[in-house]
C-alpha cells in the first residue's frame, strides 16, 4: 500500500517531527507499506528515515511577522514559489497514486496549494482515503473558527476528506465543540490520544557519565524546540543556573535549536561562558536520552515537547508562548493537574522566579515523589489500526468483516 504524507511547515520543527513519528511507527507496524513524505520543512533532510520511507522536498516558504508569506531561500516571489509547490504536489499525486493521504493541519495546504491535488484524488482516485491530522489545539476558538469560515475549510473537509484525526483527547480539548464544527464534519473526527515517543533511549546513567556529572549534581535541560522564538526562555534559564548553583550543584544544558538567529545564539553562548557547568548546544542528536537523564526540563509548551515529557514522566517548568498563537498557553491551562509541571509566563519570566521553580522541582525529585502524567498516549497504535483497516480494505476491494471507520472512532473515544 502507498501512503503519501503532506506537511507544509513554515515555522519551527513541530509539524514535521510529529508527522515523522507517525510515519516511522506505521512503517514499523504495517507490512508492505511505502511512505512518501512531501514537505517544505528546511530540516527534513536532517532527520533519519527508514528504508521504505522517502521524501520530496518542496521549496521553502516562511511567514513574516505580519503573517504574510515570503520565500526563505530562492530569489523568487512568493506567488511563483507557491505555484511551483502546487504543481509539484499535483504531479506527485498523479504519479504516485497513493492509497491513503495524510494531510497535516491545513485542509487545502499552505495558500491553498494542495487543493488541485485533492481534486485529482476525488476525480481520478476514488478509492484513495484522505485524512486530516490535527494537533490537540490549533489556536483560540474564536480565532480558529473565524479562520476556518474565511478559508472555507468546512467545505474542503466535506468534499475531500474521509477522516479527521485529532492527536489529543476530547477531555483535554473538544475540537468539535470548541471550534463549532458542524455535525457532518464532527462525524469524521477521531480523537486518537497523544503521540508517545518510542525511539531507543540510552540509560540515564550512561548519559550522565558522558557529561562528567558528579554524584550529587543535578541535570537541568532547557529546550525550545526549533528555537526560533525561544531566546527569552533560554536566556533566563542560563541566568537561573547561576543563581541555583549557589544552592546546590547544577549542570545546565541549553539546546538552542537550529532556527535560533545567529546573533541570539552568540549572546547565549557569551552568557554561558561566564557560568560554571553551563553550556549551549545547537542540537542534540539524542535529545530524548538527554531529556530522560535530566532531573528537570525547562521548555515552552509545544505539542512535541509536552508529549516527550509525558512519555518520560518528567518534571518540568513550562513557559508557553501566547503570541501570535495561543495554542501553547491554552494547552498548559487545560492540562493543569495532569502532569508534574509548573507553568510560568515567558513575558514576565525572571531568573529568580525560574531558579526557585526549578529548585522546588529538584526537591520534589529528591523526595522521590512520583512524576506521573495522566494523558492518553495511544495515538500511534490507533492511527496504525486505522491505516491497517484501509490497507485491508484496499487489498480485498471491500470493507473487512467486523470493521468500520465508525468502529475505530468508537474505540478511540472509549479509550
Image (tube, rainbow, N blue to C red):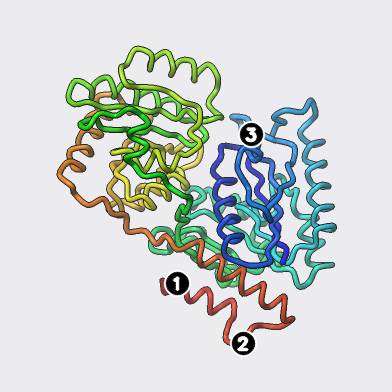
Marks 2, 1: nearer the viewer? 2
Q: Mark 2: few, some, or many residues within 10 Å (few <14, many ≥20)?
A: few
Eye-nearest disc, 1 or 3: 1
240 or 54, nearer to the observer: 54
Spot the residue most to the bottom: 401
**SS state under label 3:** strand
Is there a contact, CB below 8 Å, between mark 3 and mark 2? no
Side (left or right) of 293 relative to 133 = left
Disc 1 residue crowd, few under 14, some 14–19, many 20+, Cα 10 Å:
some
Say which residue label 3 marks: 63
Side (left or right) of 152 relative to 372 = right
Per the model, the C-alpha gap separating discs 2 and 1 is 21 Å
Percent across and percent down for residue 292 are 36, 43
For the C terminus, give its image quadrant.
Answer: bottom left
User: Looking at the image, which residue is at 24% across and 34% down?
Assistant: 357
| Residue pictured at 53% horizontal, 75% vertical | 408
For the N terminus, the quadrant is bottom right
Which of the marked residues, 1 or 3, is nearer the chain's N terminus? 3
Q: Identify residue for label 2.
A: 401
Q: Which mark is residue 362?
A: none
Q: Can you tell which quarter of the image residue 216 is in? A: top left
Point out the tag, 2 or 1, that comes first from the N-terminus.
2
The residue sitting at 46% across, 26% down in the picture is 281
Mark closest to the chain's N terminus, 3 or 2: 3
Indicate left or right for 373 with 400 as reference.
Answer: left
- For the residue pair 246 and 130, the one nearer the viewer reads as 246
Confirm or deny contact between disc 2 and disc 1 (CB under 8 A): no
- The image shows a total of numbered marks equal to 3
Q: Which residue is mark 1?
A: 413
- Cα–Cα span, label 1 and label 3: 36 Å
Measuring from the top left, give residue 123's x and y in whole percent.
Answer: 83, 67
State how far apart marks 3 and 2 are (Cα): 47 Å
Amino acid at each position: 500500500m502507498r501512503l503519501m504524507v503532506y506537511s507544509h511547515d513554515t515555522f519551527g520543527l513541530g509539524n514535521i517531527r510529529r508527522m515523522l513519528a507517525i510515519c516511522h511507527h506505521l512503517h514499523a507496524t504495517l507490512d508492505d507499506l511505502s511512505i512518501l513524505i512531501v514537505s517544505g520543512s528546511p530540516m527534513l533532510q536532517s532527520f533519519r528515515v527508514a528504508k521504505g520511507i522517502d521524501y520530496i522536498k518542496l521549496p521553502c516558504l516562511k511567514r513574516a511577522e505580519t503573517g504574510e508569506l515570503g520565500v526563505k531561500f530562492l530569489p523568487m516571489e512568493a506567488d511563483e514559489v507557491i505555484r511551483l509547490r502546487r504543481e509539484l504536489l499535483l504531479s506527485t499525486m498523479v504519479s504516485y497514486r497513493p492509497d491513503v493521504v495524510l494531510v497535516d493541519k491545513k485542509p487545502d495546504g499552505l495558500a491553498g496549494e494542495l487543493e488541485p491535488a485533492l481534486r485529482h484524488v476525488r476525480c481520478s482516485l476514488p478509492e484513495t482515503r484522505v485524512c486530516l491530522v490535527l494537533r490537540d489545539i490549533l489556536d483560540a476558538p474564536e480565532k480558529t473558527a473565524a479562520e476556518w469560515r474565511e478559508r472555507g475549510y468546512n467545505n474542503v473537509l466535506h468534499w475531500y476528506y474521509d477522516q479527521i484525526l485529532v492527536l489529543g483527547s476530547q477531555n483535554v480539548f473538544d475540537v468539535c465543540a470548541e471550534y463549532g464544527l458542524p455535525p457532518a464534519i464532527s462525524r469524521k473526527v477521531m480523537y486518537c490520544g497523544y503521540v508517545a515517543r518510542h525511539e531507543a533511549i540510552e540509560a540515564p546513567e550512561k548519559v550522565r557519565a558522558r557529561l562528567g556529572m558528579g554524584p550529587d549534581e543535578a541535570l537541568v535541560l532547557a529546550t525550545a524546540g526549533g528555537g526560533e522564538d525561544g531566546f527569552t526562555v533560554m536566556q533566563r534559564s542560563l541566568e537561573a543556573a547561576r543563581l541555583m548553583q549557589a544552592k546546590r550543584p547544577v549542570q545546565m544544558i541549553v539546546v538552542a535549536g537550529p532556527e535560533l538567529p545567529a546573533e541570539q545564539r552568540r549572546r547565549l553562548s557569551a552568557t554561558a561562558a561566564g557560568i560554571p557547568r553551563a553550556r549551549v548546544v545547537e542540537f542534540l542528536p539524542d535529545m530524548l536520552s538527554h531529556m530522560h537523564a535530566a532531573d528537570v526540563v525547562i521548555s515552552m509548551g509545544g505539542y512535541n515537547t509536552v508529549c516527550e515529557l509525558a512519555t518520560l514522566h518528567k518534571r518540568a517548568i513550562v513557559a508557553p508562548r501566547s503570541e501570535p498563537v495561543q495554542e501553547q498557553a491554552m494547552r498548559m491551562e487545560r492540562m493543569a493537574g495532569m502532569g508534574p509541571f509548573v507553568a510560568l509566563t515567558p513575558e514576565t519570566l525572571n531568573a529568580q522566579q525560574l531558579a526557585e521553580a526549578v529548585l522546588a522541582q529538584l526537591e520534589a525529585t529528591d523526595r522521590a515523589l512520583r512524576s506521573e502524567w495522566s494523558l492518553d498516549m495511544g495515538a500511534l497504535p490507533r492511527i496504525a489500526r486505522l491505516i491497517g483497516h484501509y490497507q485491508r480494505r484496499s487489498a480485498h476491494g471491500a470493507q473487512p468483516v467486523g470493521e468500520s471507520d465508525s468502529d475505530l472512532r468508537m474505540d478511540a473515544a472509549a479509550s
